Image (cartoon, rainbow, N blue to C red):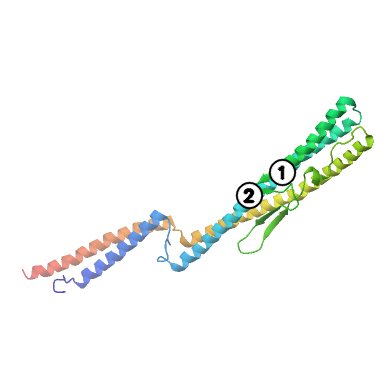
Amino acid sequence: MANDIALTSAVRTNLLALNRTQDLVNRTQERLATGLKVASPIDNATAFFEAKALSDRALDLDERKTGIDQGISSITTALNAIESIDTLVRQMKGLAISAKTASGNQLAAIKTQFDELLTQITNLANDASYQGTNLVNSTTSQLEIAFSTDTISKLVVQGVDLTTAGLSITTAGTFSLSSVIDARLTEIDAALSTLRGRAQTIGSNVALLQARLDFTDRYVNDHEDGAGKLTLADINEEGANLVALQTRQQLGIGALSFAGQAEQSILRLFQ
């Protein structure tokens, strides 16, 4: 345009160099402020989307980690219930043994306590729910824990029936008969054996889930570290870059000043 100011080649070259240096300064300051060398696809599309894929995978795995952790809590609830039921069954065994030498009112009280414990065992089993899942009051209940979003890797824990019906313990009945007491003791011993077996079976899943939880935790960290390698800035390097760029700016300003002085020298020749 007619009103444009014509600049010499030297001045224009120095201005362009200063502009490029200022852009680099701005970029370096942004990296220092955000801690990121790749904050958007504009910075580096390949690194950005690779890092996003790793971060998304880490988020998916983190959800699975939460599910595993909750699964451990569900199984721990079941184990606590089994331990408490075992305690009640052992109390019943003590009452049955006492009934052998009891008579009259004492025997009646033992029968009442025995049948009350039966009721409490079922109540306890029915109360042992965690987030809507009860693993000790029905063989149809089931806990499914997924380990991955990419595979069918999972653990299925089958519920057990540890109510008095499931343990096959019946009421005191005619405790005055020795044969009845012996029958109840046989049922109780079988129930205690069942409880031990169920505790061992269900409890073994806790160790498995804890191993998967530890692995998933490390796996999430691996993905997050990988994403960071692609996007995070080296703060020490960027700090050094900023110092170097600021020095370059000062040199550029000096060079621009020299270029201007050259034009002034030419002007003085015409004065």
Q: Outermost residue, top direction?
A: 105
Q: Residues within 10 Å of mark 1 (few under 14, many from 20)?
A: some
Quarter-wise, where is residue 3 in the image? bottom left
Residue 30, given in percent of the width and then of the height, sits at 37, 57
In this view, 130 is above or below 87: below
In this view, 8 is above or below 68: below
Residue 199, given in percent of the width and then of the height, sits at 76, 46
Label 2 sits on a secondary structure element that is helix
Specify whether 48 is left or right of 183: left
* Tag 2 residue: 70
- Image point 52% across, 60% down: which residue? 55
Q: CA distance from mark 2 to mark 1?
A: 19 Å
Label 1 sits on a secondary structure element that is helix
Quarter-wise, where is residue 17 in the image? bottom left
Identity, as a three-letter code, of the amino acid under mark 2: Gln
- Image point 68% across, 52% down: which residue? 209
Residue 87, given in percent of the width and then of the height, sits at 78, 37
- Image point 70% across, 49% down: which residue? 206
| Residue 168 image label | none
Circles 2 and 1, Cβ within 8 Å, touching? The answer is no
- Image point 84% across, 38% down: which residue? 171
Identity, as a three-letter code, of the amino acid under mark 1: Asn
* Tag 1 residue: 126
